Amino acid sequence: MAEPLASSAAADPAAIAANRVRVLLPLPLAGAFDYAPPAGESPPAPGSFVRVPLGSRERIGVVWDGAADGPAPRRLKPVLEVLPAPPLRPELRRFVERVALYTMAPPGAVLRMVMSVSEALLPPRPQRMCVPTERGVVALADNGLTPARRRALLALRAAGAMPAAALARRAGCGVGVVRALIAAGLVEERPVAAAAPPSPPPDWRDRGPPLSADQAAAAARLIARIAAGGFGVALLDGVSGAGKTETYFAAIAAVLAAGRQVLVLVPEIALSAQWLERFRERFGVLPAQWHSEIGMAGRRDTWRAVAAGRAPVVVGARSALFLPFPDLGLIVVDEEHDSSYKQEDGVCYQARDMAVLRASLAQIPVVLVSATPSLETVVNVARGRYERVSLPRRHAAAQLPTTQLLDMRRERLESGRFLAPPLVAEIAATLAAGEQALLFLNRRGYAPLTLCRACGHRFRCPNCTAWLVEHRFTRRLLCHHCGHAEPVPPDCPHCLAAGTLVPCGPGVERLHEEVAARFPEARVALMVSDLLGGPRAAAELVRGMSERRYDVLIGTQIVAKGHHFPWLTLVGVVDADLGLAGGDLRAAERTYQLLHQVGGRAGRAERPGRVLIQTFMPEQPVMQALAAGDRDRFLAAEAEARRAAGLPPFGRLAALIVSADDAEAADAAARTLARAAPRQPGLTVLGPAPAPLAVLRGRHRRRFLVKAARTLALQAAVREWLSRVRVAGSVRIQIDVDPYSFL
């Protein structure tokens, strides 16, 4: 059987190396396992993908670096096969190790993200392809063929071998016609190794719109950084509408001209239809894409294309960081501040920070792009670790929108209504001018809570400490944490009273209802992930706004993702205070970023934009900064508050989440951890305490928060702590270094 690494000082290192292969498997195990080389062969090189036995099953792993210690046991099993996939390059293997070390995840769990499409590692499966027989070629000269059969044979002769279904489409006939040709011996099907269809490369020559003076200067600095070679981080810091995308497209063109690959990370690739179209206009083709909406076959083909160097540009979500680029020359992180770059499950990592790590290992530049950069990035610029490249003005004649705060303590709202009179008046004026309006509310569904006004019963999720959210369009009550769904009952299930269930508070669906009632002639659209059936539906909605098929767009945070609507001149923010609740240390920063980005959708062309923000706390620093347009002053105040509290980026945090199927086991494990908690200068352990979501997906959760000085080796302290603790097998302990979620 396979053996984990063992040590013996008496062994001959050369003999061990010749008889032992270290293989890291994509499993959450302690480390690499030992195998014998394939029978009669020399050990495969590090980075090779191999098939090995593990217990009664077979697994695909990667030959890892480093010599095994100690003599090989006689029962050591051999590597079964070396796969023909391109080997993992040393820089990617080092990346796996460094990510595992930082996140405190098993290296195999990180490797699993690299090997997320196991089928891509196997030889392409042969396809059954149609080819004409000699009889078929002769038959074309006769007049006895039906028109459909003749078309099929002519198409096959012109285009070469192809699958039966593709031949039928090309010939404009049914598959039955092709099958009849096969039965008649005029066509035969042969298994042919499927070759990747060639894709035209991006045209890196200058074919985009002319750059402004600001853009040209910024692009020149990025290109100079690329030409200098080596690792470096640049922040492309530009106001919304400044043309940041076209600016970093110039940097991408410079890398393509040098024959190297580019990775662009975006927070919502499935909703980036406009970005993809702009890329096509600039480079003539679409980039390769990598995100969860792509099917397994598409992911397999993309993985292979990247590994073979046939994908010059990849645009993707955070997991694209783990693709096996053989010649990566640049990484771009668009909207670098976006919290969706933080992976919360499995291996907990921050893709922006890991992008910087990967660039440093590959010795290439990385460009971080944002109109509202994260405080971590701003501090790194101030410390001289990152270079700032600024775009201080909007492109062309566009001006930044004006921002007005609406103090909801003074506004008189009608019963069951949620739009303040000044905002209603602005919407009416916008529609009368033939322009478009955007209403933003970061709450999905119709209402966040449904209760019985007779007995007070509230609908809770049976699996989580959360209320069920009413979704009136689908007539369901949903939990947004575990996915539990149930129909909205006609009567209260607790007291059986009829007609007593009432929605409390607004969601975007309820806002849609109000707008439709106030402006019955307006064409209203909802942009929310629950109702978008994938990238095509999102692209169609964006296209509809651009073509003025809608007058009012209502949405959650996905409406802030860089969309450009020339006729959109009004943005209304409903319940701006929503993100400021709770104990999230980044609550103020994230609220500012989100509302600034949403407001930035207004007035991006020649028509001036207005932003109205409904808030119950107009004196709050976030609201004052938005009204004054003073981002830098807000960030300076936020930095000072974090520095005084020793919080990131001036201190370090790690969260430990203890979970179990029953509360007793979770509490017992938490008490055991608490008794062994480290006590040393510069480190504080807070907890245990029930998590705000004390039950999630049926598991009871307790939290610790470890706070440390920046100079302290946080991971080492946590690792030593956990090494002294044994908990029940049913208990899980998840470690989140640099937590973003505090639920």
Image (cartoon, rainbow, N blue to C red):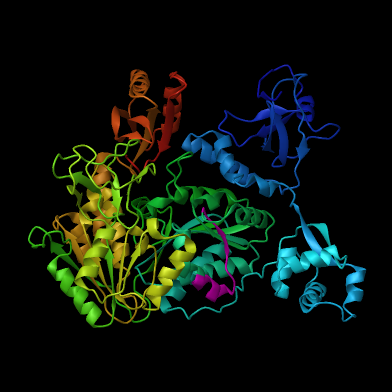
Q: Image quadrant of residue 571?
A: bottom left
Q: Image quadrant of residue 82?
A: top right
Vertical relation: 206 (above or below) 46: below
Q: Position of residue 527 (x, y in %)?
A: 36, 63
Q: Residue at x 43, y 19 (%)?
A: 725
Front in this rendered view, residue 275 or 699 = 699
Q: Residue at x 17, y 61 (%)?
A: 418
The answer to whether residue 736 is left or right of residue 194 is left
Q: Image quadrant of residue 390?
A: bottom left
> In this orientation, does residue 207 appear?
yes
The answer to whether residue 730 is left or right of residue 298 is left
Image quarter in which the C terminus is found: top left
Q: Is residue 70 magenta?
A: no
Vertical relation: 354 (above or below) 652: below
Front in this rendered view, residue 176 or 627 = 176
Front in this rendered view, residue 433 or 631 = 433
Total tally of numbered discs in the picture: 0
Q: Is residue 284 magenta?
A: yes
Q: Residue at x 65, y 45 (%)?
A: 118
Image quarter in which the N terminus is found: top right
> In this orientation, does residue 67 appear?
no
Q: Position of residue 688 (x, y in %)?
A: 30, 26
Region rendered in magenta = 277-292
